[in-house]
Image (cartoon, rainbow, N blue to C red):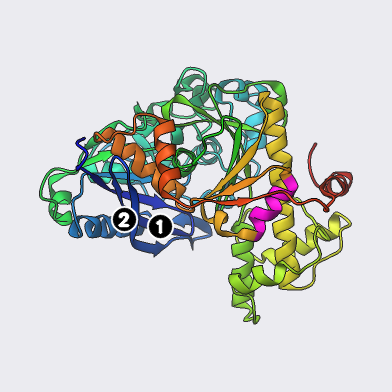
Amino acid sequence: MSPASAVRVAAVDLGATSGRVMAGTVTRTGLHLEELHRFPNGGVRANGSLFWDVLGIYRESLNGIREVARTGSLHGIGIDSWAVDYGLLDRDGHLLGNPYSHRDDRTDGVRERVAGIVEPAEQYAVTGLQQLPFNTVYQLVASLGTAALESAETLLLLPDLLGYWLTGQVGAERTNASTTGLYDVRTGTWAAGLARELGLPWSILPPLRDAGDQVGPVLDDIGRQLGARQPVPVVAVGSHDTASAVVGVPAEEEDFAYISSGTWSLVGLELERPVLTEAARAADFTNETGVDGTTRFLKNVMGLWVLSESVRTWTDQRIAGTDLVSLLAAAHDQPALRTVVDINDPRLLAPGDMPARIAALAREAGEPVPQTPQAITRTILDSLALAYRRNVRLAAELAGRRVDVVHVVGGGSQNSLLCQLTADACGVPVLAGPAEAAALGNVLVQARALGADVPDLAAMRALVRRTHELHRFEPRPGLDWDAAETRLSGAGAVAP
């Protein structure tokens, strides 16, 4: 790439509550993002089940990509999204119904059924995966015997499904494939033997591809819809949004932890190889593949979903002063660590009356029951910070690493109260930002594949540091986080 040249791409960044399409431009010294299209997203309940409106997501993604093309050059397209959910194609390449949401209750009890067939330790030795009840493997076991699964020719995770509609090419990008519970983290291949043990049709798993591979040019009719003046390649990025977000972590320290903070919070370390010890399995840590062969050694924490669902409940109830800005301002003045709950309790997973669930968890743990939206908001933030503390320390212990700084990226990096509480809880500085780390990682991997001078993760992160403002939060003394942890553990609310 010459000094005057630039790579301009469309980054489709899909979240569980909203999607956006960004125009990203990379030069030797510059990295610029511009949001050109945003649209709401969420589960759609029909016939007693919770689905994704994947055709609506595809339509809105196309609208956003078209806007990128309309406003300037379009050299590439990359797609990242949440993990584990998938669509099934028949032998003609047609979608066999709307994909289920991972928050659907069809997987209730399935993890326990699978444990009766394959020992959890055996599963972990192969996949290295945190055994969450909604992992793809459990969704597939829940679908055994259904017409859709029996008719399926191909399984495509959501970013790969959208890429298939753009290019006609099937495949599975590794960072997302590694979240399925059907990927062998030791060999980098599908765990066909595990699938066979569970009676799953392993032949539906598509060929694997790496982040940075070119999936293919967009189909001719798609190119015409986009108004593109030349063939546009779709590039496989870190298609799990956390993998892209970790690329966008502006770390220069070697001993850092990260928190990708959004609907979910992903708390962990970047390692050279997976940690497959019994201690890691017992602690329920996951080993997911990262960009450039790295390992994302992390723990899923429920995240800001709990707060956003609480705000939705209060809005539906028309309670005044419960917009997010007002709640966060008021929560700052609430008593610190008065009430903490296990923010990872599975009862907080599904949509519903989250404030009532928080109150019930507090009551069960013997904690003071928060009565107001402001007190509940502070309970959520304190409980999140406590969970971050627990899992940053545990990740470091399990991996034999030290942590000198915690990088918080994603939407939660804009929540200054949560970032300060995280620094206080972890006892190390927090560097917050950028908020759009997933989109930045998406853009940077595309740009490298298309010739930009960002040859490795260090160069990508250096460019993020030079072009984006970070906010530093120093730990403050005075709050007894050890006592809060002891209270919660003593109540049996948090597994050891």
Q: Going by the image, does 321 lie left or right of 436?
A: right
Q: Which residue is mark 2?
A: 61
Image quarter of the N terminus: top left
Q: Position of residue 58 (x, y in %)?
A: 31, 54
Q: Amino acid at mark 2?
A: Ser
Residue 395 is at least partly visible in this image: yes
Q: Which residue is mark 1?
A: 19
Q: Is residue 165 magenta?
A: no
Q: Position of residue 279 (x, y in %)?
A: 72, 25
Q: Is residue 418 magenta?
A: yes
Q: Earlier in the sequence, mark 2 or mark 1?
A: 1
Q: Which residues are magenta?
A: 417-425
**Classed neighbour count for the residue bearing mark 2: other residues with Cα under 10 Å, few (<14), some (14–19), many (≥20):** many
Q: Image height check: is 244 above or below 367?
A: above
Q: Amino acid at mark 1?
A: Gly
Quadrant of residue 327 within the rendered picture: bottom right
Q: Position of residue 96 (x, y in %)?
A: 35, 46
Secondary structure state at the residue bearing disc 1: strand
Q: State whether the magenta stretch is mostly helix, strand or loop.
A: helix
| Mark-to-mark CA distance, 2 and 1 | 8 Å
Q: Residue at x 59, y 57 (%)?
A: 305
**Classed neighbour count for the residue bearing mark 1: other residues with Cα under 10 Å, few (<14), some (14–19), many (≥20):** many
Residue placed farthest to the top in the image? 187
Residue 85 is at least partly visible in this image: no
Q: Residue at x 50, y 19 (%)?
A: 193
Residue 272 or residue 252, whichever sits in front: 252
Image quarter of the C terminus: top right
Q: Going by the image, does 367 lie left or right of 83?
A: right
Q: Going by the image, does 151 lie left or right of 354?
A: left
